[in-house]
Image: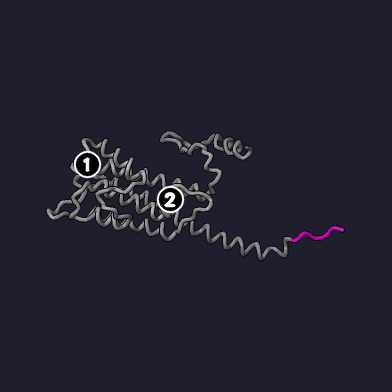
């Protein structure tokens, strides 16, 4: 209880930093946090932020490619609701025919794919991220992640973005209209959103590697320092 009160007091400390462009927000306390380490919390926060970025990308892609949401829904909002309930909720996207992570990405970015490409692409990206995190979206004390898998996921997102920007269909049109630089129009919001996902993944991979490295170093330091930390008789 004392720890919770202290945490609340620290959270309420006033900051002198400017807030004209918004304030940093923290999550409200939940009982499950008592079973999470700092690393678990960081991993879970990054996962939620990345899934939220994918949701924003889906909305942006549907706005630029309305023909895609019309393949599965009556409105763009309805298509996004389906995506929320199915893909971002952890269910496979049926048109991908059971394919997962990078195999699903290859299908979603194939010129011959005729389904809702936006949903398929976002679904594949989400499944790639979740798979890289050991198939989990929430993390507790006994849960670990492989930093190399997280690093590989970041590189896969870079590849997916490059394909999205460069690949064309049989008619020479982009598979999906995304970034745009034409005349005075410069729309790079897709690039920025993907950049945030990639940055979070790279930071998490580095943090996890460093945490494991420091654990080994701390153990070695404890062995070296042990002879000097023995209490001596005082009488």
* Residue 150's disc number: none
- Residue 67 placement, left or right of 37: left
Tell me which corner region of the image, top left, top right, bottom left or bottom right, holds residue 63.
Answer: top left
- For image coordinates 62% across by 37% down, the residue present is 1
In the image, 164 versus 139, the foreground residue is 139
Q: Which corner quadrant holds the C terminus?
A: bottom right
Alpha carbon separation for disc pair 2 and 1: 28 Å
Q: Position of residue 72 (x, y in %)?
A: 22, 41
Q: Position of residue 120 (x, y in %)?
A: 26, 49
Q: Position of residue 170 (x, y in %)?
A: 13, 55
Where does label 1 land, which residue? 72
Is 191 one of the magenta-colored residues? no
- Residue 22 placement, left or right of 117: right
- Tell me the element at label 1: loop
Where does label 2 land, which residue? 136
Classified by dominant secondary structure, the portion drawn in magenta counts as loop
Which label's residue is closer to the chain start, 2 or 1? 1
């Amino acid at each position: 209880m004392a720890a919770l009160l202290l945490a609340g007091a620290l959270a309420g400390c006033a900051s002198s930093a400017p807030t004209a462009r918004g304030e940093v927000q923290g999550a409200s306390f939940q009982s499950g946090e008592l079973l999470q380490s700092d690393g678990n919390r960081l991993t879970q926060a990054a996962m939620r932020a990345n899934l939220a970025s994918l949701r924003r990308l889906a909305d942006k892609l549907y706005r630029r490619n309305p023909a895609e949401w019309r393949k599965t829904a009556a409105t763009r909002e309805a298509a996004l609701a389906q995506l929320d309930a199915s893909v971002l909720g952890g269910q496979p996207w049926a048109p991908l025919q059971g394919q997962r992570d990078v195999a699903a990405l290859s299908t979603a970015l194939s010129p011959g794919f005729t389904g809702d490409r936006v949903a398929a692409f976002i679904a594949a990206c989400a499944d790639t991220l979740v798979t890289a995190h050991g198939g989990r979206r929430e993390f507790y004390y006994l849960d670990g992640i492989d930093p190399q898998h997280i690093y590989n996921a970041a590189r896969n997102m870079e590849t997916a973005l490059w394909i999205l920007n460069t690949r064309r269909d049989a008619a020479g049109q982009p598979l999906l209209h995304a970034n745009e630089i034409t005349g005075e129009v410069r729309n790079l919001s897709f690039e920025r959103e993907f950049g945030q996902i990639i940055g979070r993944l790279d930071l998490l991979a580095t943090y996890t590697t460093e945490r494991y490295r420091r654990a080994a170093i701390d153990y070695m330091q404890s062995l070296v320092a042990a002879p000097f930390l023995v209490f001596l008789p005082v009488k």
